[in-house]
Image: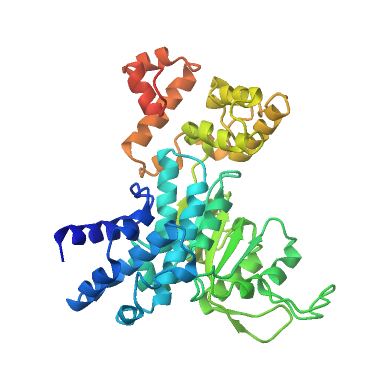
Amino acid sequence: MPSSTSSAAARLVRDHIGNPFVAARPANPAQALRDLDLPALFDAALRRGDRGAASDLALAVAHAQVQAGVPPAGLLDEPALPRSLARRLPHPRADYLRVAAAAGRCEKVLARIHGSSDAMQRARRHAWAICFGDTLRGALELQRVIRDHDVLIFGETGTGKELFAGAMQDAAPGPADGTPAPRAAINAAAIPETLVESELFGHVKGAFTGAGETRAGRLRSADGGTLFLDEVGDLPSTTQVKLLRVIESNEVTPVGSDQAFTVDVRYIAATHRDLEGMVARDTFRRDLFERLAGNVLRIPPLRERPEDILEIGRGLAAGYIADESAPRRVAIDAWLRSREARLHPWPGNVRELQNALRNLVLGLDPGLRRGEGAPPHARLGAPDAIRRFEAPLAEVEAWYARGVVERTAGNLSRAARALEVDRATLRRKLGRSPG
């Protein structure tokens, strides 16, 4: 086989088997596929006995096809992968199809979340890795490990925890035809304490006053997929005990019943509360916390990534006024660049920003929460990652530079002198364009 063809195949695997948020992807995956003799590449790998290389190629081809818009039913179909070759792969075609379709769904949702700051890029990379490991090979060969490794998402109100949770639910490989896995969600803060267990575990008819019919419950609805436990910190203590038992036994017993049902679910929990502090105060069970915190994803608040305000705001404003040249869109764009927007602590995060933009669209004052400041835990100073000594140096410098700029009331010249750098260097650290 010509070395140029082998190199093209290696590039295809490199570009489409790994985390899509680590490096830029080729602009035209469909063209990359057309430029290769895929049957010959599969045949060559299988002839030399390299089933691992053939398996990686199948994952890469299927993922590239998803990105090129091929529907799940058409992934790894002929002529790309003749049936005679598909039978010689280490896994059934359906396994590759399921993983690639899930990766495509997850990537699409994560890419739609506004925010290009380093902090948000890290959050996307981490979220994808939680679902698939370092490469799609892990999702193919270690599905049981990934499924048993639950997720806990931390983030203040309005940071987008639900969006990341939705991407992770989309990332669960579903049936053999590539369609999404079952999913369910419950918001523990929005359901009366007396009904939480019925919603989670289901109930039989007559189990309590008002139980006029039997209900399966959210856990059984999510069997074979994922359950999103929003605001898990609001779960009653008695429910925490019962949920932990379900997680550890994979069996759920409806309220009022003696019959247990087997469930196979990955749990994705989220909270705006300080759950670690609640564990220390014995208001949240440590054993349940440890079980849910197999993977921990922290969504940074807006005040820690002010460079995202313009992008997020523009995306929200476009949903109200499509014409970028419309006078009100131009005015909104100018406000998003203003000192007021840049230095506001945004205690309500993106939800507060959305409210401000709606006010501006209506010709009103943005209505920012004057003097409220950041939430109590944010007033401690540095962001969580910096306090835990886990942040890269660039993030520490950007955080400190923003603090100096705020202390000098937005005067970049004074801030630059205090930092002993020039204005251009300060702008780079703040993530702004020159000018």
Q: Position of residue 291 (x, y in %)?
A: 48, 66
Q: Nearer the viewer, residue 352 or 247?
A: 352
Relative to 152, residue 399 above or below: above
Q: Position of residue 345 (x, y in %)?
A: 56, 30
Relative to 255, residue 361 above or below: above
Q: Count all numbered tags in the image, as a single digit.
A: 0
Q: Position of residue 253 (x, y in %)?
A: 65, 80
Q: Position of residue 245 (x, y in %)?
A: 56, 75
- Determine whether, in the image, residue 97 is placed left or right of residue 322: left
Q: Residue at x 41, y 24 (%)?
A: 433
Please state, as top left, top right, bottom left or bottom right, where the N terminus lies in the image: bottom left
Q: Residue at x 39, y 44 (%)?
A: 388
Q: Can the viewer see residue 1 in this picture?
A: yes
Q: Residue at x 40, y 46 (%)?
A: 122
Q: Can the viewer see residue 173 in this picture?
A: no
Relative to 325, residue 101 above or below: below
Please state, as top left, top right, bottom left or bottom right, where the C terminus lies in the image: top left
Residue, far bottom? 259
Q: Nearer the viewer, residue 266 or 24?
A: 24
Picture quadrant where residue 51 is located? bottom left
- Determine whether, in the image, residue 45 is placed left or right of residue 426: left
Q: Nearer the viewer, residue 49 or 167?
A: 49
